[in-house]
Image (cartoon, rainbow, N blue to C red):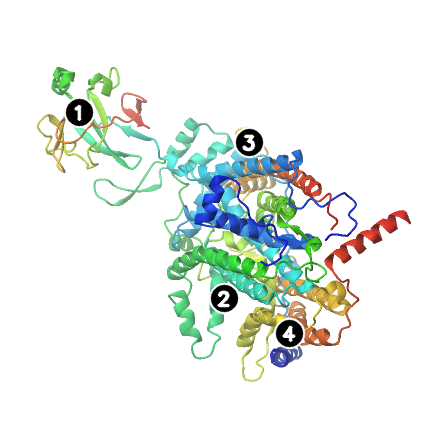
Amino acid sequence: MSFPWAKPYEPQHPLMKWMDEKLPIPRLVYNATGPGYPVPRNLNYFWNFGVLAGAALVIQIVTGIVLAMHYAANAGVAFNSVEHIMRDVNAGWFIRYAHMNGASMFFIVVYLHIFRGLYYGSYKAPREMVWLLGVVIFLLMMATAFMGYVLPWGQMSFWGAQVITGFFSAIPVVGDPIRVWLLGGFAPDNAALNRFFSLHYLLPFVIAGVIILHIWALHIPGSSNPTGIEVKDEQDTVPFHPYYTAKDGFGVGVFLLVFVALTFFSPNLLGHADNYIPANPLSTPAHIVPEWYFWPFYAILRAFTFNFLWIDAKLWGVIAMFAAIALLFFLPWLDSSPVKSSNYRPLNRIFFWVLVIDVLILGFCGKSPAEQPYVIMSQLAAAYYFAHFLIILPIVSRIERPLPMPNSITEAVLAKHADESSAATA
Amino acid sequence: MASETETTAGIEDGVRRRDFINIAAVSFAGVGAAAVVLPLVNQMNPSADVLALSSTEIDISAIQPGQAIKTSWRKQPVFVRNLTPVEIAEAKKVPLSDLRDPQTIDERTKPGKENWLITLGVCTHLGCVPLGAAEGENRGDYGGYFCPCHGSHYDTAARIRKGPAPKNLAVPPYEFNSDTVVTIG
Amino acid sequence: MVRPLGFLVGLGFIAALLCAIFTTPLSNEANASHEFHKEPKHLALSSDGLLPHWDKAKLQRGMQVYKEVCSACHSLNLVAFRDIADLGYSEGQIKSFAKSYDTIPSVNPDTGEPSTRTGLPSDHFPAPYANETAARAANNNALPPDLSLITKAREGGKNYVYSLLTGFQNPPANLPKELQPPTGLHFNPYFANLNLAMAPPLHDGQVTFADGSPNDVKAMASDVAAFLVWTAEPKLVKRHQVGWAAFIFLLIFTGLTYMSYRNIWADKKH
């Protein structure tokens, strides 16, 4: 990090001096999260979600490791081992529900974090790498969550695994061999369950590693801010500690309140009753649905019902579903506006909100049965989704006239307070 | 170079206000963290189903004097022996100074139930299951139990007399529910 | 490079979707069972809401209904005899209750043949059938599900269970021929497919309660539904108690962190 006014690390205590000389972790912490990291002073609460995502990951890893002490990854006993945890293991019910709802909290927080990025142009130069690493984290999260949901070996676990691995058979020629290779068999069974457990344990640590890169990449240019104007001098910033450690502490409090309300008072609200039925390969549930955080993508998958241009509908659905995430990688280059924040991009702002509503509609369609009117809703909503990123954003970013922008962060802050004090005296 | 008009005097960058409220917030966080750690540590303690198997009832009515049965408690072997008067007398004759792990037979049985010798079937040397409980098994030089792994000999009160074992066969906690039923653990 | 290619890819997806829109019929296949299917009735229980507690007498009656009626066909695999201490039974009562079961699968210690023995508190409720095949053979090829988790495994939970048990009735006069119950099935509008393999299991006065509590179908259905809420989640009450403690603690904690945040930022315009 290269802000010249950043406070240098000067260890006082002899122990800290020794540590810093031998392995400069104290210095690293000081410069990354301490008084040594200057951060724009005008961040709003949408900037809390990064730390909250990290907190959610820690919760998942801790509860997950503890669950793994009691879970048995074998198709004959997996379901019962989870019930053993719920009934017999000391505080097992708490740990299991915390892990189950922690996953939902993780996705809630990450979606808010992503939409913050979309609104404020956080993906734009010089922070493209932060964004790309973020999309990688999102993909890893989806893989981890999918495999984790298979582990209790309920009806939805099994049939969800059947559907998702079935995607691969849509690939021409090599599709089914790949599917069989993934499963270690012809349908989800012991082989699949065991390897999903192994990978589910592994991936969160890979995610942690990519998060370190993500934060490192961020700390090169430093954090963005709601105006999208880069930091120019010292008065634009405050040291991360104590200003943002305090604000993040408050954010964690609110996060935990929501988490506790969910985990203790309504732990099965976001789940599906069918997953309390042991997996039965001979009986398909009436409606196979994934967990809520996959609903928009599930809707996109099912929207393609026509064999278009020699590619059959099933393959279109699979390609579109992956493309819906893959296009996020190209966002820094699809959107060419030099203005970052949608606060100064009125046209972009309108389309941003349309996208939010569109994604909510897609989510609603994903949970609904594959019947009308949900089919046509998902088809129109999916069309808008692709249009938004691939057609609308590139055009808007070229033709839009941004609003006049202040010269610096400090100017924006002072202007805001001048407004408030003149309103007060008026 | 700051020339803005802050309403308060001076910029106190990085100076941590050691105000009470901050300390209160951090302390609460500490208390919360401790409250969360407790169940995370306690989950490693035996679960309810394991505890349910932590005591076992044994029906001893079929064991004749001079006979023993092998049974199981907390997944470990247990010897329940009905000592004959000759065996009891032999055990009482042994001076405590001869014993590596001095214990009288009274210390190893319940009052009024001197003939019932209930011990773990685990050699105190390295954990093998000694012979002598079943009919026809080698009972060693002292007429009790004999461990074939490294040659530990136990006497009629299952006390170590010869060989590498350091201690007598362990007596688990048990109670007589009646003359014919014992609960171990 | 990215933008023109992206533009074409976008057009491709939109074209595929437009074709899909114009070739998918706008109305659904006729599914008349929707019209006759009823949403579950609401059953108020002491275990409802944010401050639940167990009505132990009711749970005991529910267990009696399970034992005397349902256990003939439905297993309760996940519940151990020792668990019924929650219902207010003493250690001695649990021991005799367990001993009253002599169908616990075991092995003859002399011959090694499969046999049975009497129950211990550590045993789980024994199943009525040895395996799925036996269960289906005895029930016209239908498999009576295990009831341990039934109130969590069905949409509508205990309301659904109560409605199903009290919902058996003659099919309405206007029920189309294809929805009439085939032989061996029974009409019940609370069941998604309308016709259920289970015959109405409850009749007025079927179970006699020692304390003289009502034993009409509605009362027994309510008692057994309450029992099944407990079997599905014995820790439900504890969960709410701990939840309130945690929530109130966090309210105070969040309040403190907010005050700390405002304190630290007091001198900084932002």
Q: Residues within 10 Å of mark 1 (few under 14, many from 20)?
A: many
Q: Residues within 10 Å of mark 4 (few under 14, many from 20)?
A: many
Identify the amino acid type marked 3: Ala
Say which of marks 2 and 3 sits in front.
Answer: 2
Residue A362: name its quadrant: bottom right
Q: CA distance from mark 2 to mark 4?
A: 29 Å
Say which of marks 3 and 4 sits in front.
Answer: 4
Give the residue at mark 4. Answer: A334
- Asked if one can make out residue C38 in the rendered structure from this viewpoint, the answer is yes
Secondary element at tag 4: helix
Give the residue at mark 1. Answer: B159
**From the viewer's perspective, is residue A160 above or below residue B98?**
below
Say which of marks 1 and 3 sits in front.
Answer: 1
Give the residue at mark 3. Answer: C57
Give the residue at mark 2. Answer: A164
Secondary element at tag 3: helix
- Residue under mark 1: which chain is it in? B
- Residue under mark 3: which chain is it in? C
Q: Residues within 10 Å of mark 3 (few under 14, many from 20)?
A: some
In the image, farthest residue toward the bottom = A309
Q: Residue at x 83, y 51 (%)?
A: A420
Q: CA distance from mark 4 to mark 1?
A: 85 Å
Q: CA distance from mark 2 to mark 1?
A: 64 Å
